[in-house]
Amino acid sequence: MKFVKMHGIGNDYIYVDCFTEKVENPSSIAIKLSDRHFSVGGDGVILIKKGTVADFEMEMYNADGSRGAMCGNGIRCVAKYVYDHGYTDSTHFTIESMGAIKYIDVTVEDGKVATARVDMGKPILKSADIPVNCHKEKCIAQPVTICDKDFVMTCVSMGNPHAVMFIDESPKDFDLNKYGSAMESNTELFPDRVNAEFAKIIDRHTIEMRVYERGAGETLACGTGTCATVVAAMLNGYVEGDVTVHLLGGDLQISWTGNENDSVIMTGPAAYAFTGEVEI
């Protein structure tokens, strides 16, 4: 099977062009190929397909084999791939993931996509829809204890569930593995598990964050998590307007009006790492 390794600011996936390749048992393949010691290595596998309700479809599997609903960094890479490989000559097109349609605008330099702007849709704020077991209709600034530490969390879904905690220390110094893994696997609080973000407010237009992703562990970046973090920061009055978010793998730009009926807009790069072929 031929594949392309791509990343969005370090959030790396193994991409398979299903216009030319046929993939059976993608869940087991994702587990096998994502192993960074014995195989290709990555945060998961994304299949690129012709869409049924959109121009294209991305079918995402996490490193543990679970199906992912949406990946903001992944969808930018899919956008780059389909344009660069001539599947579209338009700089505006749509990509679906588990039935959700996202609208993409790409910026082209020297005939190749450099960055992609993605309409990530409206944030989902109702606790029952995220889902999170919270006594409030919207889980905003809710005290929560993780292991031996108290946090205040705000929960948002961007097609997948996120719990955002704002911290005073630099996320680079934070024990993400301990607290992120405990939050991600807390099924009493999050029936479908959760992506856990720990973020520090730098100023009214800048945030620094790290993320522990559901089904993947820590990743260098998370597009939906970045969107959720900015939404949570606005809901708590910490930021406004356009916000730059610093992640371990690089920066993303997020725009939101603060109105829950308006879409969150994410802009960032996508890049190739290498191509290869593997026996499956």
Image: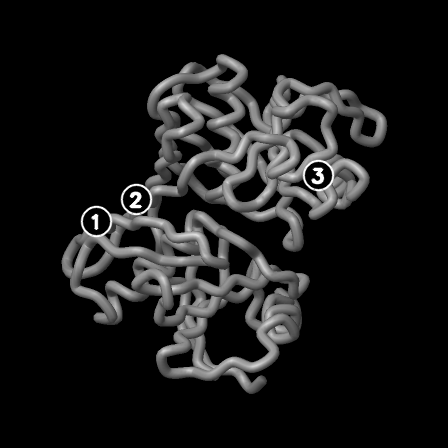
Question: Which residue is painted at 40% across and 23% down in the image?
Answer: 259
Return the x and y of residue 168 as percentages of the image width and height. 62, 17
Q: Earlier in the sequence, mark 2 or mark 3?
A: 2
Are the residues at dot 1 and dot 2 in contact (C-beta closer than 8 Å)? yes
Task: Return the x and y of residue 12 as percentages of the image width and height.
Answer: 49, 57
Give the Cα distance between marks 2 and 3.
Answer: 28 Å
**Is 60 on the left or on the right of 87, as rendered?**
right
Find residue 205 and report its horizontal and vertical position in percent.
39, 20
Reading the image, the residue beneath label 1 is 107
Q: Which residue is mark 2?
A: 117
Please, is residue 229 above or below residue 274 in the view?
above
Mark 2 vs mark 3, foreground winner is: 2
Is residue 254 in view from this perspective?
Answer: yes
Q: Quadrant of residue 151?
A: top right
- Left or right of 241: which side holds 73? right
Q: Residue at x 80, y 25 (%)?
A: 145
Alpha-carbon span between mark 1 and mark 3: 34 Å
Q: Nearer the viewer, residue 199 or 249?
A: 199
- Identify whether 178 is placed above or below 35: above
Disc number for residue 180? 3
Q: Dot 3: few (<14), some (14–19), or many (≥20) neighbours within 10 Å?
A: many
Crowding at dot 1, Cα within 10 Å, few <14 / some 14-19 / many 20+, comes out as: some
Question: Image quadrant of residue 171?
Answer: top right
